Amino acid sequence: MGNHAPANGDPSSSPDPLGRQRRNVLFAAVGACLLGLFMIHRAADPTAGLPPLPNSMAAQASPSASTSAAAGRTVPALAVPDARPTRLSIPSIGVNAPFTGLDVDSTGVLNPPPPDNTNLVGWYQGGTVPGNRGPAIVLGHVDTKSARGVFWGLSSVTPGTTVDIARDDGVTASFTVDSVNVFAKDQFPDDRVYGKTPDAQLRLITCGGAYDRKHGDYTANVVVFAHLTGLRES
C-alpha cells in the first residue's frame, strides 16, 4: 500500500494498487467511525460504514457531479507522487491538525486514526495526494468515548470555506469547499465521492446523523466536497 505513483505524477491513471476485491473491502471500512472505536469491515456489520466502491470504478473513471464543475478551473494539479500531507487547517471551525497515513492491514481492512486522539486526521495514502489530480480522501473522528473529535464541526462548514493542506514537499494546497452533504449510509453515492476526477479535489469524511445505540454507529456520513484553488510555499 505504500507504493508511490509513477513518475508522471498522475495517481488517477496508475494501476489500482489494490485488487478489486481488496479495494471493495477498503472502502467498505472507510465510513465506519464508531464512538472512539475502530472502523470495521462492512461484511461484519452490514449497517456500518460506507458502501463499497463498485468494481467498475476500480477499472475506469466514473462521471460525477464534480467532473463538469472542473471546467474553467485554472489551478493545475501538482505532479509529485511521493509527497505526503502533514497538516490540515480549517480556520472557520478551528481545525489545525496533523496527519497520519492510513493503510490496509493484512486482512484488507483500513486502519483508522487512533481512536483516543482528538486532534488527528487520517489520509488514505494508497490514493491521491492532496493537491495532485484526483479525489484525496481524508477521514476524522466526529467524537471519541470521552470528547469531541477533530471533525466535530465539519457539518457546519459552508460552501466557499477555505481548507489548507500543508505537504512535506514545501507546498500548501488550498481548497475551496463546493458543498457539504449528509448521506444516509444505505444511500451513499460512492461514485460521486470516490470517482476519478480531471482536477485536484478533496473529500473530508466523518460520521453524521443520529447515533444508533442498537448498532453502535451513526446513521449517516458527512462528506465535504472541495476543489483546489491555490498553491503556495509552506
Image (tube, helix red, strand yellow):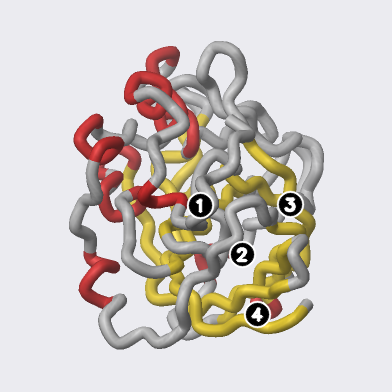
Q: For the residue labelled by badge 2, is the local secondary structure a helix, a strand or a loop?
A: loop
Task: Name the disc covering residue 191, or none.
Answer: none
Q: For the residue labelled by badge 1, is the local secondary structure a helix, a strand or a loop?
A: loop
- What x and y, as percent, mark residue 50? 39, 37
In this view, 158 is above or below 206: below
In this view, 40 is above or below 138: above
Mark toward the viewer: 3 or 1: 1
In the rendered image, which residue does mark 1 sit on?
128
Q: Residue furthest front?
A: 7
Report the side of 51 relative to 166 (left or right): left
Give 120 or 196, whichever is nearer the viewer.
196
Give 49 or 111, whichever is nearer the viewer.
111
In the rendered image, which residue does mark 3 sit on?
99
Task: Name the disc covering residue 92, or none.
Answer: 4
Q: CA distance from mark 2 to mark 3?
A: 18 Å
CA neighbours of label 2 inside 10 A, class few (<14), some (14 to 19), many (20+): some
Q: CA distance from mark 1 to mark 2?
A: 24 Å
Q: CA distance from mark 4 to mark 2?
A: 9 Å
Mark toward the viewer: 2 or 3: 3
Q: For the residue labelled by badge 4, is the local secondary structure a helix, a strand or a loop?
A: helix
